[in-house]
Image (cartoon, grey):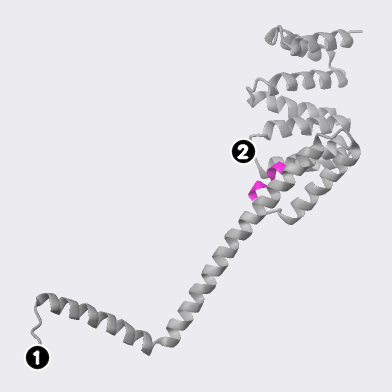
């Protein structure tokens, strides 16, 4: 005697039929399904590999940066040369990594410390072009001005420093840039401008070490 099937049973049978239909479709399209499965696996493996690779890159860059910072603090040329070597090797290998900015920052400063001023200037300029919104932008500009000064390109140094002063309000950067600017003005023979700059530092930063430095430098300027 045939079994009675109620509405619930009909729904269950419909679900079973749909599953069986899917199974039959897979069987009839097994080549396409196999290809899709293999492709999905390949994509998944590549994605996992890329994530691991990216994390590995960031970890390597971070570890190298920590090593560079440690060597940077050492008071000897050998350590600075070793730090520079790590900088340049890291940049060469991970040039497209977003976290390479810290390595570039130290590369420029290390070149400057090693009296390789033209090379440091090139690195600073590249940094400014590559990271126009960077938090160290004004510090790098100040370093660029110092590199110009070492190369006796005083007009270029003055222009960079004046540009920084037009936009910065940083309580550390501004007085240091003003001191650099007054020194450059003196080197250019613009003694009156240098005196006014020193006077403004003494007035605006009265009671600080900046005012003391400005006074001593102005006194030396007038000898």
The boundaries of the magenta stretch are 98-103
* Residue 104 location (% of width, % of height): 74, 43
The numbered dot on residue 133 is 2
Most extreme residue toward the right is 223
* Residue 97 location (% of width, % of height): 66, 52
Of residues 146 and 60, which is closer to you in this image? 60
Of residues 81 and 182, which is closer to you in this image? 81
Of residues 186 and 92, which is closer to you in this image? 92
Decide: is 90 above or below 5: above
Of residues 158 and 218, which is closer to you in this image? 218
* Residue 85 location (% of width, % of height): 83, 48
Q: Secondary structure at mark 2?
A: loop
State the image quarter where residue 223 is shown.
top right
Q: Which residue is mark 1?
A: 2
Q: Tell whether position 90 is magenta.
A: no
| Residue 20 left/right relative to 147 | left
| Residue drawn at (81%, 39%) of the image | 71
Q: Quadrant of the N terminus?
A: bottom left
* Total numbered labels placed on residues in the image: 2
| Residue drawn at (85%, 18%) of the image | 186
| Residue 53 left/right relative to 196 | left
* Residue 188 location (% of width, % of height): 86, 21
Label 2 crowding class (10 Å Cα cut-off): few <14, some 14-19, many 20+? few
State the image quarter where residue 177 is shown.
top right
- Give me the C-alpha separation between circle 1 and circle 2: 79 Å
| Residue drawn at (75%, 30%) of the image | 142
Q: Tell whether position 102 is magenta.
A: yes
Decide: is 162 above or below 65: above
Sequence-wise first label, 1 or 2:
1
| Residue drawn at (88%, 38%) of the image | 114
Prevalent SS, magenta region: helix
């Amino acid at each position: 005697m045939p079994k009675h099937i109620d509405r619930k049973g009909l729904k269950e049978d419909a679900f079973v039929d749909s599953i069986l239909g899917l199974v039959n479709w897979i069987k009839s399209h097994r080549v396409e399904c196999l290809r899709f499965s293999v492709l999905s696996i390949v994509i998944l493996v590549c994605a996992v590999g890329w994530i691991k690779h990216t994390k590995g890159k960031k970890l390597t860059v971070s570890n190298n940066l920590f090593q560079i910072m440690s060597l940077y603090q050492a008071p000897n040329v050998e350590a600075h040369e070793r730090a520079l070597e790590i900088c340049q090797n890291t940049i060469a290998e991970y040039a497209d990594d977003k976290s390479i900015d810290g390595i570039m920052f130290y590369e420029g400063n290390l070149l400057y410390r090693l009296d390789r001023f033209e090379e440091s200037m090139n690195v600073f300029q590249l940094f400014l072009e590559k990271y126009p919104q960077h938090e160290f932008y004004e510090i790098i500009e100040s370093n660029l001005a110092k590199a110009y000064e070492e190369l006796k390109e005083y007009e270029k140094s003055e222009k960079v420093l004046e540009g920084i002063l037009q936009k910065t309000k940083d309580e550390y950067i501004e007085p240091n840039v003003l001191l650099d600017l007054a020194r450059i003005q003196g080197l250019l023979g613009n003694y009156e401008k240098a005196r006014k700059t020193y006077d403004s530092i003494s007035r605006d930063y009265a009671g600080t070490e900046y005012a003391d430095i400005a006074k001593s430098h102005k006194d030396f300027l007038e000898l």
